[in-house]
Amino acid sequence: MIGLKIIPISLVEILARLIGYIVNLYRGAWAYPAEKVIRGLYWGLIFKARNLKIGRHVQFEGIENITLGDNVRINAGSQIVAGVSGFVKMGANSHLARYSLLSGSGGIEIGSECMISSYVAIYSVQNNLNESNPALASSEYYPVSIGNRVFIGTGAKILPGVTIGAQAIIGAGAVVTRDVPPGATVTGVPARALTRG
């Protein structure tokens, strides 16, 4: 792994795009998937995971504290931040769509077979404002746990300290401020259980 870290990511990116270009000459529809496979091979060696698919401009911060399962897909523009003391764990066969953020300074654990849509933000850290002197705001860390086979809709926000049970559905644009039971569907701001009537 130490040897891989000295390979500049820009070199991996050039290789991925070159292979994508060559593939595009023969089979256009396969160009972008080919790029994702090349990036996935590189990051798979670092994270010790098989069959990763990594899109363009994906950012990893705190690589030592990030764990990805096999067959994870991370699409373009997403950010996974573990920081120095936090962690992010993502189970096998899970998918993080475009421009999503996992802010894991307080710890984020995502189960397997989860589908996280575009522009989703999951936070495990928040500011504790000091009303008498806002410049003295401090950070508070609360882990987030997401069970297996959870679906999170486009633009949803998961706030620090939340636990989402297995097979739950989080509606598009929802802001989740409290725990979600297994199998529940929640929507709205703040997110509430969907009632059938």
Image (cartoon, rainbow, N blue to C red):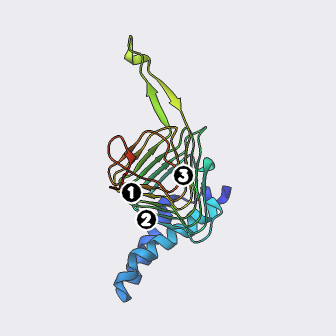
Where, quadrant-wise, is the C terminus in this rendering? Answer: bottom left
- Which amino acid type corresponds to the residue marked 2 in the rendered image? Gly
Asked whether the residues under the numbered discs 1 and 3 touch, taking CB atoms below 8 Å apart as contact, a structural biologist would say: no
Quadrant location of residue 190? top left
- Label 2 crowding class (10 Å Cα cut-off): few <14, some 14-19, many 20+? many
Q: Is residue 178 left or right of residue 109?
A: left
Tell me where residue 179 appears, x and y as whole percent: 50, 43
What secondary structure is marked by label 2?
loop
**Residue annotated with mark 1:** 77
Rendering quarter of residue 132: top left
Q: CA distance from mark 2 to mark 3?
A: 28 Å
Separation of marks 2 and 1 at Cα, in angstroms: 7 Å
Identified at 38% across, 14% down, the residue is 131
**Residue that mark 2 sits on:** 55
* Cα distance between the residues tagged 1 and 3: 27 Å
Q: Is residue 106 left or right of residue 127?
A: right
**Residue shown at 34%/52% (left/top)?**
155
Residue at horizontal 32%, vertical 50%? 173
Screen quadrant of the N terminus: bottom right
Residues 64 and 167: in front is 167
Marker disc for residue 165 = 3
Q: Identify the secondary structure beneath mark 3.
A: loop
Q: Position of residue 103 (x, y in %)?
A: 48, 43
